[in-house]
Amino acid sequence: MTNGELPTTLAEFKALAEQQLATGTWDYVAGGAGDEHTLLDNEQAWQRAQLWPHVLVDVRAVDTTLQLLDLNLAHPIVLAPTAAHAMYHDSAEAGSLAGASAASALAVMSSLGSTPVAEIGRLTAEPWWLQLYVQRDREFTLDLVQRAIKYGATAMVVTVDTPLLGARDRDRRSGGHTVDGMQPPNLAPISDAVAPDGPLHQRVYNPHLDPSLTWDTLDWLLEHSHVPVLVKGVLRADDARRAVDHGAHGVIVSNHGARNLDTVAATATALPAIARTVAGQVPVLVDGGIRRGTDIAKALALGADAVLIGRPAVWGHAVGGAAGVERVVDILRAELIMAMALLGAPSLDELTPDLVSQPAV
């Protein structure tokens, strides 16, 4: 598919990706936990928030640039970590990174990626972050952190909301998914001692996920990481406060794409209280249900410094490889510029809370 043939909306990318991906792969990408109430609400919460624009503002120049930690970024759209990009397109993480670079987007690579961190470092000259699942083997985890930094990772994004996986019924109906049996190249080989086996009720734990993580684990990671550490998976203001007090360099408001615990709060609903509590001490990012530039404008007005997109980037990758990823980001960036201009907010710091009514629960 050539650039001229690529879709013009994220909804069109989604429809085409569903057609092109195998059923089991699509179920893995699209599905949420349980009855998928939060999966739906992640999108609808952004839609429920209403915009209240200023008029008679000079918007001949709209500036989307920002500084995020030590990075100067062209816009606040970040590629969220998603597993095993080889499932979606032959170009795997190479395609995603190329698309991100072409669209001037920061990319967060997953511990569950299909490409080793050493290869990630050779694939891109751009800054990138590593999403980290802390392993039971702490020495192996530390080695992974050090390898990632060696090959160019400028921050660690530690996932804290996934001691185990939720009830992913779509995957179960599909008979499981290939990612369940994969050995991600960045993670330690799984021994028989931690492999999921036995009666169904005993198979709630995942061998790649350590259910013993605590705040002490965060302290350990902060002590041993020589790059900033952001905490991903926060929905409560008191947890955000505690993360900052422990020394986290950033907080990511996330419910894991609604893939773990169903009926938790949508991220748009959780964001304002967390942003007020953090009060600018560290960056606050948010993911979950971002589908339009207006969603991004609302997120920034409600206190986020940047947003992450997961499924939309996968749709773009599946449909058009690197060019598809680039197009998805470019669509959102163009829509953000339109929204900012029409809100009378020509710079990101002018996206203030008075421009949006907070989403009702």
Image (cartoon, rainbow, N blue to C red):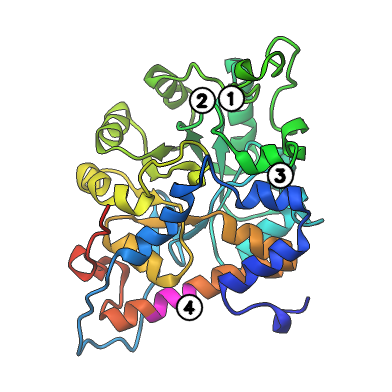
Q: Name the residue beneath numbered marker 4.
A: 334
Q: Name the residue beneath numbered marker 2.
A: 163
Q: Is residue 274 above or below residue 321?
A: above
Q: What secondary structure characterizes most of the magenta part? A: helix
Residue type at mark 3 is Ala
* Dot 1 or dot 3, earlier in sequence: 3
Q: Which residues are magenta?
A: 333-338
* Dot 1 or dot 4, earlier in sequence: 1
Residue mark closest to the camera, 3 vs 2: 2
Q: CA distance from mark 3 to mark 4?
A: 28 Å
Residue 334, magenta (yes or no): yes
* Dot 4 or dot 2, earlier in sequence: 2
In the shown orientation, is residue 32 left or right of residue 180?
A: left
Q: CA distance from mark 4 to mark 2?
A: 37 Å
Label 2 environment density (alpha carbons within 10 Å; few <14, some 14–19, many ≥20): some
Q: CA distance from mark 1 to mark 4?
A: 38 Å
Find residue 202 and report its image quarter. top right
